[in-house]
Structures are given as C-alpha cells and as structure tokens.
Image (cartoon, rainbow, N blue to C red):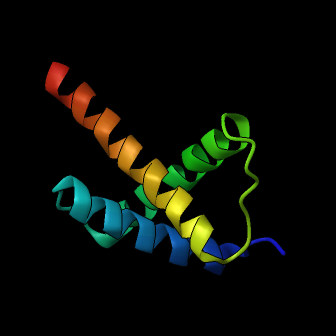
C-alpha cells in the first residue's frame, strides 16, 4: 500500500523536523515539510539503487529513509552555502 498525500506530508514533516534537530538548523514547518519530502525521495533512491531495499508505505523504515535523505540534503546544502 502506497502513501497518500497526507502520509507524505506527515512523514515529510516528521523527517524534516528530526533532520533539523540533528543537523542543528532552525526552519519553519513548510521548510521541514519540503526537506522531509525531498529527503524521502533522495533516501528512497539511495536505498533502492545502492542497497536494493524497496521502501514504501506508512511505516518506521520509510521514516528512517526519509530522515537519512533529509540529513544528507541539509548536509549538502550546508556545503554549498559555505562555498558561496
């Protein structure tokens, strides 16, 4: 069973908020949502292509993958921001 739009929003907000806390950033709710959803896409791509792990549905593994992708996204954005 796939995630509906509400599921993506919930996972995105939680993953973005967790990544924000771990990475020492301070964002608003909408930014956390965007970071979480984009992080879920990045994490899902990495999990599927590098580790051959399919992730989907509304479960803990989806949150972990989204969180990891969100942390990676914030890390990479931090690197780009430092260079500019």
From what the image shows, is residue 20 above or below residue 6?
Answer: above
> Residue at horizontal 63%, vertical 78%?
7
> Residue at horizontal 18%, vertical 19%?
83
Residue 38 seen by the camera: yes
Give the image location of residue 68, x and y in percent.
45, 52
Classify the position of the C terminus by image quarter. Answer: top left
Q: Nearer the viewer, residue 55 or 29?
A: 55
From what the image shows, is residue 37 above or below residue 63?
Answer: above
Quick check: 50 left or right of 80? Answer: right
Give the image location of residue 67, x and y in percent.
45, 59
Residue farthest along the top direction in this orientation: 83
Query: Residue 2 occupies which quadrant of the picture?
Result: bottom right
From what the image shows, is residue 32 above or below residue 5?
Answer: above
Residue farthest along the front direction in this orientation: 51
Give the image location of residue 41, x and y in percent.
60, 49
Residue 84 seen by the camera: no
Give the image location of residue 52, x and y in percent.
75, 42
Classify the position of the N terminus by image quarter. Answer: bottom right
> Residue at horizontal 52%, vertical 78%?
10
Quick check: 8 left or right of 2? Answer: left
| Count of picture labels | 0
Quick check: 50 left or right of 18? Answer: right
């Amino acid at each position: 069973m796939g995630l509906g739009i509400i599921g993506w929003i919930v996972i995105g907000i939680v993953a973005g908020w967790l990544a924000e806390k771990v990475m020492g950033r301070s964002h608003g709710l909408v930014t956390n949502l965007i970071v979480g959803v984009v992080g879920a896409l990045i994490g899902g791509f990495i999990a599927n292509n590098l580790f051959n792990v399919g992730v989907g549905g509304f479960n803990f593994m989806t949150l972990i993958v989204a969180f990891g992708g969100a942390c990676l996204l914030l890390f990479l954005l931090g690197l780009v921001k430092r260079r500019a």
